[in-house]
Image (cartoon, rainbow, N blue to C red):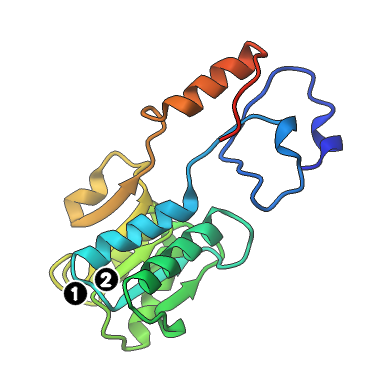
Amino acid sequence: YTPSEIAVINVPFVMCAYTNRFGTLPPKLFSSVYCDDYMIGYNTAKTLIDAGHKKIGAIFTSKSDRSASQLHYQGFCAALSDSGIELEDKYIVETKNNSIEMGCAGANTLLNRGLDMTAVFADSDAMAFGALKAIDDRGFRVPEDISVIGIDGKGDGSLADFGVTYKQVDLKDNKPDLEAIEKAVKKEKTEQF
């Protein structure tokens, strides 16, 4: 966003899921609550690494679209690097969106490459569900043969019934963000984090 784009908003507002990491809007012009998508990608990858996985296939919406997906990818790469695991492009798939269909297509691409992967990192729960379908259709068992982890935890937990792990993003415990929303609505000055 730009200053002129938000100038027309004449009510208190808080941007959700907007970090301005890729934008040009000066931080003093807006209040925002968001989760650290880079750290979510990092911690999600570390969950797999800490479970002993070294050959991890990954499905991202994009590695460079200036979105949460790009930040998940960067966090994923950092976790591998910090753990001494070499990132190989053949283990990465980019899709058109983060749907079940794209998760299935992404997992099929990884499986068609004949990789010796033991886990799949999916950029969203929907993509994790699609990966689960592709893996099951090929006769592999989750998590016995290939573990699957997704990001969001937006579902009702039903993915866990199929052996899928997911990292849930939970804002209710994020007191600073909730306080920032309250202050913005009251037109109070908020701290920079």
- Residue 101: give x, y in percent of width and height: 44, 62
- Residue 23: give x, y in percent of width and height: 72, 49
Secondary structure of the residue carrying numbered label 1: loop
What is the spatial separation of the Cα atoms under label 1 and label 2, in whole angstroms? 11 Å
Does residue 41 appear anywhere in the picture? yes
Vertical placement of residue 115 versus 96, above or below: below
- Residue 126: give x, y in percent of width and height: 40, 54
Determine whether, in the image, residue 1 is placed left or right of residue 49: right
Instruction: Tell me the quarter of the image containing the N terminus.
Output: top right
Vertical placement of residue 160 versus 14, above or below: below
Q: Are marks 1 and 2 in contact (CB under 8 Å)?
A: no
Does residue 129 appear anywhere in the picture? no
Q: Earlier in the sequence, mark 1 or mark 2?
A: 2
The residue that mark 1 highlights is 140
Three-letter amino acid code at disc 1?
Phe
| Residue for point 37% across, 36% down | 170
Three-letter amino acid code at disc 2?
Ala
- Residue 156: give x, y in percent of width and height: 29, 38
Determine whether, in the image, residue 35 is placed left or right of residue 18: left
| Residue for point 70% across, 37% down | 27
Determine whether, in the image, residue 127 is placed left or right of residue 160: right
| Residue for point 87% across, 36% down | 4
Quarter holding residue 180: top right
| Residue for point 63% across, 10% down | 186
Task: State how many labels appear.
Answer: 2
Residue lying at the far left in this picture: please name it.
144
Looking at the image, which is closer to me, 137 or 97? 97
The residue that mark 2 highlights is 119
Which of the numbered marks, if any, corresponds to residue 83? none
